[in-house]
Image (tube, rainbow, N blue to C red):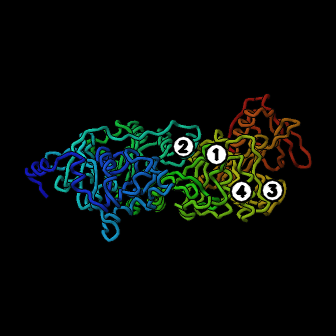
Amino acid sequence: MIFDEHWKDYYRERVGSAESILRSVISDGNRIFVGSACGEPQHLLRTMISLIPEYRDLELIQNLSIGEVPEDWNQLQEHCRFKTFFVGPRTREAVNQGAADYIPIYFSEIPRLFRDESMWKLDVALVQISPPDEHGFCSLGIAVDICKTAVESARLVVAQVNPRMPRSFGDSFIHVSQIRHFVEFEEPLLEFTFRERSAVAERIARYVSLLVDDGSTMQVGIGRITNSVLRFLDDKKDLGIHSEILTDSHLHLIRKGVITGRRKNIHHGKIITSSCMGSADLYDFVHDNPEVEFYPIDYVNNRRLISQNERMVAINSALEIDLSGQICADSIGHRVYSGIGGYVDFMHGASSANKGKTIIVLPSTTSDGRRSRIVSHLAHGAGVVSSRSTVRYIVTEFGIAYLHGKTIRERALSLINIAHPKFRQRLLAEAKQLHYVYDDQILPPIYEPLYPGQWETHQIFPGDVRIFFRPIKPTDERGVQEFFYSLPDQDIYYRFLSAMKVFPHRNTQGMCNIDYEHEMAIVGVIGEIGNEKIVGLGRYILDQKSNLAEVDFAVAAQWQKLGVGTFLLHYLCEIAKSKGISGFMAYVLASNRRMLSVFYKVGYQVHTTLEDGVYEIAFRFDEPVQACITDC
């Protein structure tokens, strides 16, 4: 390498026009790499495209094309075969018409292809760089990804020197001596903006925000929904970034002080990425900024490195998922739509991390609303990007399904209940045909199209005990069974006025599949979403003739005397009043003094009658009294 003052002479001698240089270095049969995405050397690629008809059997290799590659490749395919590792909007038609090729591969594996000349020999690499600094080093700026390895592996390199390319830190630098020819050409960098936000994307984002803990390190894939997720993390603290792509949504959180990297285990305090896709504002931010470090894709997407980040969260989108948990993310049937990218790298890495999470987001239906994206079986020809064994959280606008460690039956039921309501009965019927669920499995009547998340709340009890209260879900069936089996026999007798010993599916599924309108059940749970333990349950059922609802509740033994039962009753009163219900009634054994005391603390005038050792209790919400709240 030339590291002394002679590098300037070397550089000046090799500066020329794009056309003259490309004519001198390109030969028939060459394999030519082109820098990808927003780092694309547009001037070089425009010139290359214009020269293609003069050659035969060229191969043009690019990762993601969003700039100068023509959408119609039919006129060029006799002279050059275009190949891509990730299908974007400019190459989608050409690939699906057979005029261009898609190479399914993990991003982390691409550099190995370039290094192995027995498989892939790069003859020429066309890249874009910043002007050389005083030592002769240029930066690959916003597109280190696979470009760094391409520069190191290609027989010769032609670089477009663009003053607008940021100088980025990390492993982004190449010396002028590694480059054969330079084309000085200034032009705006490609920018990538997302479509306008949608209500569906925002509802999904709100659910995802419930899964992201303070101090998490984030990887977020590219797309409108994943982009929306970041916009709803404003209330988080000390998030970190380890992701193959940096976008304007990351910048939004950085400027709000949400992203600090203070709790990262690897690259403490640093934003680690491989490329940028965004606005000029984002590119200005990363320029000469030591807070952000760019590394080649095989480093950033290294699964072992990813797993060293505690609370690593990988959020990616899908096109379709079947009821067993198989995920299709790169095709719609046989039609290729995108690519594998870093999807699986981060799924495996985050799954192996301490307290790591993998989250897959998708709308419940296609954009026209005609097809469910949750299906009994994937479309014919669809590619399985992630197997059913690696998936954890699935999120649609209708809620969260946790699949890890769950049976096929539990998975199917969880996914059906976050599918669009108009497809749920059909999915249930198909699941029964496949013997995925019980033959007598039911679904709740749909009065509210969305799960009533407005009734979710956290409550702190004495001893800094934190319990999450939420409406019951169909997927709580096993949790309800375990809750009842954990109750002492006396509590079961008090709860059911009989000495029940078993709580089979036929009984418990009715408690979990409710309409949230005439019947409501609230569970108090502890633990992570999807792996929760029920410690308290309160429910009411409306008698539409009297407009009074029968109410009951139970609290696990070790959680009693904290006020959990009192809270459940008060909370159910609040929900019932919002729905226009007039009051509650209940049947309580005279010996159950603890439950009786809860009713007398509710804050309404209580009317009781005693018959055969059982109190019938009733109170109306329009008859308040001064209540004295004590522990239950």
In the drawing, what numbered circle is on residue 373? none
Q: CA distance from mark 3 to mark 2?
A: 43 Å
Q: Nearer the viewer, mark 3 or mark 2?
A: 2
Q: Nearer the viewer, mark 4 or mark 1?
A: 1
Q: Nearer the viewer, mark 4 or mark 2?
A: 2
Q: Earlier in the sequence, mark 4 or mark 1?
A: 1
The answer to whether the residue labelled 3 contacts the one labelled 4, judged by CB atoms less than 8 Å apart, is no
Q: Is residue 245 visible?
A: yes
Q: Badge 3: few (under 14), some or many (20 or more) residues near its Cα, within 10 Å? A: some
How far across and down, in percent of the image, does residue 431 sit?
72, 60
Q: Amino acid at mark 3?
A: Tyr
How far across and down, in percent of the image, does residue 390 sit?
53, 62
Q: CA distance from mark 4 to mark 1?
A: 19 Å
Q: Earlier in the sequence, mark 4 or mark 2?
A: 2
Tell me the SS state at disc 4. Answer: helix
Q: Which residue is mark 1?
A: 398
Q: Earlier in the sequence, mark 3 or mark 1?
A: 1
In the drawing, what numbered circle is on residue 205? 2
Tell me the SS state at disc 3. Answer: helix
How far across and down, in percent of the image, does residue 454 sit?
64, 38
Q: Which residue is mark 4?
A: 477
Q: CA distance from mark 3 to mark 4?
A: 20 Å
Q: CA distance from mark 1 to mark 2?
A: 11 Å
Q: Nearer the viewer, mark 3 or mark 4?
A: 4
The answer to whether the residue labelled 3 contacts the one labelled 2, judged by CB atoms less than 8 Å apart, is no
Q: Amino acid at mark 1?
A: Phe
